[in-house]
Image (tube, rainbow, N blue to C red):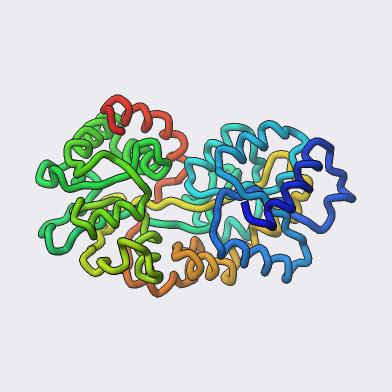
Amino acid sequence: MNLRSAAVCTFLSAVSVLAVSPAFADGEVNIYSARHYDVDEKLYANFEKKTGITVNLIEGKEDELIERMKAEGDNSPADIFITADAGRLWRAEQAGLFSPVQSEVLEARVPAHLRHPEGHWVGLSTRARVIFYDKAEVENPPQTYAALADSQYEGMVCVRSSSNIYMLSLLASYIAHHGEAEASEWVAGLKSNLAREPQGGDTDQLRGIVSGECQIAVANTYYFARGLAEDVSGLSNGIDKIGVVFPDQDGNGTHVNISGAGITAHAPNRDNAVTFLEYLTSDEAQSFFANGNNEYPVVEGVAASSFVESLGDFKADELNLNALGENQARAQEIYNEADFK
């Protein structure tokens, strides 16, 4: 937790045990955020400058923040919950922590598949989960997610643990498109093709290609783009050997996920919260997401960073991302049934 968060934490902890009166709440918005990127601080500062609304920030891990809001109940000072991955937003929505929002701005600027069908949350930025490969070692890289389970890639693939939310969401999407039986077969085939036990984060999967431990890896685009933009240890010096495939271009399209936010069920500053969400879909804020963290904007016409643009254009899957949460539990069960670590 940063110094700003620590200072605000003391304030909000005291408020959380008391009802927040409208007079006390004027002119501010209280944000609980599981995102931990420097660009977000710039977004908050710019919003304050433009609107005069003070941003009070609490940062923490997503599950901790969800449990905190549940414990605070009706007296929670939180106005907005921000997190990465639609599956986590689904968890918060299932816990009754969001209230639906009707906003012509959000509906006009954010595509429907990147919003909750009833307005409980909205996507703010996207990332694609793609296939990376060693250009020197893999002559015919997999062109689909299904192909990752093909026996020709035995002993070549590196992925994260099955409990990771990105892996859960990818399998949840697979279930939505192909059904549970095919999803189970896919997991079994993927497990047979692993170069090592699932471990580490997305950057570690890419490092595995550089080191030669893996020839194929699955990771989100912005981790690779970060390796192009910055000096990432164990990645940037060997990044030229890595190729990229946007899977399923002849089918459903490449799996995408979001960072997103919802207004809480007991938001004491609801109008300010709506203003904040609408600001985050402005061209200016979308450019912050794009250039500050190499994420794709959700708003059409706003350019991605030059590093992300260098990966090329692709067709994205337009499955409504609420399905990622709906299939999340079954996805974990399928991984467990295959003894996939």
Residue at image coords 35%, 46%:
200
Left or right: 153 with respect to 57? left
Residue at image coords 73%, 70%:
49
Residue 285 quadrant: bottom right
Residue at image coords 67%, 41%:
99
Q: Position of residue 276 (x, y in %)?
A: 68, 58
Q: How many marks?
A: 0
Q: Is residue 260 above or below residue 174?
A: below
Residue 149 quadrant: top left
**Whether residue 306 can be seen here:** yes
Q: Position of residue 27 (x, y in %)?
A: 82, 58
Q: Position of residue 183 (x, y in %)?
A: 27, 34
**Whether residue 248 can be seen here:** no
Pick whichever, 51 or 4, lies toward us. 4
Q: Position of residue 258 (x, y in %)?
A: 47, 52
Pick whichever, 215 or 178, lies toward us. 215
Pick whichever, 137 or 81, lies toward us. 137
- Where's the C terminus, which quadrant? top left
Pick whichever, 18 or 96, lies toward us. 18
Residue 246 quadrant: bottom left
Residue at image coords 33%, 72%:
310
Left or right: 250 with respect to 104? left
| Residue furthest bottom in the image | 306
| Residue furthest right in the image | 23
